[in-house]
Amino acid sequence: MNRTRQPQSLLRAAIILMAAGVAACAMPAPVLEVDTIYLNGQIVTMDAEARTVEAVAVRGDEIVGVGSNTEIGLMAGPGTRVVDLEGRAMTPGFYAPHDHFPWAGAIAVTTVNLNSPPMGPVQNIDGLVDALREKAAETPAGDWIQGWGYDDTLIEDQRHPTRHDLDRVSTEHPIYISHTSGHLGVANTMALGMAGIAADTQPPPGGVIRHEADTGEPDGVLEETAAWMVMGIVPPATVEQKLEGFRRAVQIYVEQGVTTTVITGGTAENVVDLQMARREGLLLLRVVTMVSKAAPGFPSPAEAGGFVSGFGDDRLKLGGIKIVQDGSNQGFTGYFTEPYHTPFNGDPEWRGYPARSREDLTAMVKGLHRAGYQIAIHGNGDAAIDDIIHAFREAQRDFPREDARHRIEHCQMVRKDQLDEIAELGITPSFFVGHVFYWGDRHRDIFMGPERAAGISPLKSSIDRGIRFTVHDDTPVTPVDPLQLIWVSVNRLTRSDQVLGPEERVSPLEAMRAMTIDAAWQNFEEDIKGSVEPGKLADLVILSDNPLTVDPLAIREIQVMETIVGGETVYLRGD
């Protein structure tokens, strides 16, 4: 982006001459000089009128003026920096409304990439084994080897790896690899032994230990909470690894125009690490972090510390309390009222399973709701969503509370009648709409069948009911990419270029709302973020093209040219 085509003095002189043509009383002289003005742009404000204007003025970390080149030009003083946008678009900074920052950076530091194309190189189990062997060759015996992102439905073998596959990598290293969903994983024989997992081991509630049909021994695949039996004994990353993970994650996010990330779940240690990264000057973007709650009677870190949703500041603050009520649809652990389209392990009645009973979930929700927390509950299958809606309804009945903005995370296979209840109760979903592209073909052909798959992430049906929502990548499950999310929300194209659920497509403006102003609203930040308006934080993104006016199929080709957080440039694309 050429921002020095015109010397600053000449550009400022042009502004003064342009302004001379208007009445002196058009705008009062500024009391304080503004730091920066951006002119000659397509400023997509995302305000209530959805205006697009030419110019913006920034003082400190705040937007102080929005309007025409003439209006904003009058705010320039002798020391004001003037940026010519040269017709490019500027939008509010994007939210990553549901993800697991800084995991995208952390896994790059500590794990082997086992994703299949286009996210990684693995095409079959032999390739997976080879990738892990490379890591084993440079790892001292006895040290852990970790991998991330394998997908049993994408690799040629069309199955999960087993402990025997991982034993081919090494019998001298404990090995654990995570499924792309994050809801399953596989351990080798050594790791299973270290975790005390044998043929007669009982899984924790909400988890499954898979077994070999002929021997009855564990086959290495661990579902949901059972995976933590191994993950819980993996040594934590070192301080140096954590800081490097933050560096990499921040760079990944700001290159995509993300100025606020919402971390959905975590531990007290994760919050401590975030504060460490902030002290080290690594948090160049803003963070809303949730913490997790697993069961009634076991307080979350926020409850234990006496911190309620909203505690913190505009750089790092506590969001909702995260609860997980089911698993992953593509892992066959999402919880449904009707069986999966393709029988799982030969069981035509398989519907997945909940993480806990409806009664336990309701007890958890009531306690948190009464205490004033925002609550965010993971629900993929419609049976899990039934449980979640019931819990929210019961909590509001017993302890009425205005504007709680409780969330349903992913909310993928929500039914239309459930959307009616969500609208009635004022619940706000965060849809994992990226599934339409990444897994849409397999949802249609394997998991859900054509009819149900067409209704995945029903954005238009939600808008028709007045429901405000966000859309997300669930990074590192899929790469953080707001423009890709807008593209898939508008086009609903799968990997095979087929439209999945055309009636659920939305306009570019509606998709943009889910990444900006409605994301701010969902997190109680609409007064300071989400739109380009005076008084709001100067969190801005400069784009090569305007998402509202380009060919909808070209939206994901738009480039992020510059990312600005609090008036400071944190990413500038090279020419």
Image (cartoon, rainbow, N blue to C red):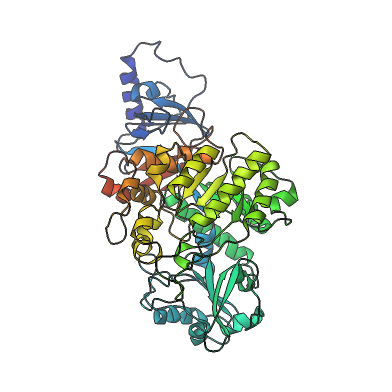
**Quarter of the figure that contains the N terminus:** top left
Outermost left residue:
551
Is residue 565 among the parts visible in the rendering? no
Question: Taking 208 as reference, is 337 above or below it?
Answer: above
- Residue sitting nearer the eye, 431 or 89: 431
Where residue 290 appears, as percent x and y from the top left, is 61, 50
Question: Which residue is painted at 64% across and 68% down in the image?
Answer: 236
The residue sitting at 53% across, 34% down in the picture is 528
Q: How many marks?
A: 0
Relative to 142, is 304 on the left or the right? Answer: right
Frontmost residue, 307 versus 101? 307
Q: Position of residue 387 (x, y in %)?
A: 57, 53
Left or right position of 144 against 487: right
Q: With 186 as the anchor, is 495 left or right in this view? A: left
Question: Can you give x and y, in whole percent of width and height, for residue 168 in the image?
Answer: 49, 87
Q: Nearer the viewer, residue 42 or 419?
A: 419
Picture layout, residue 366 above or below residue 73 = below
In this orientation, does residue 74 appear?
Answer: yes
Residue 70 in the image: above or below residue 347:
above
Look at 31% across and 19% down and name the residue there: 17
- Residue 187: x %, y % from top left: 56, 78
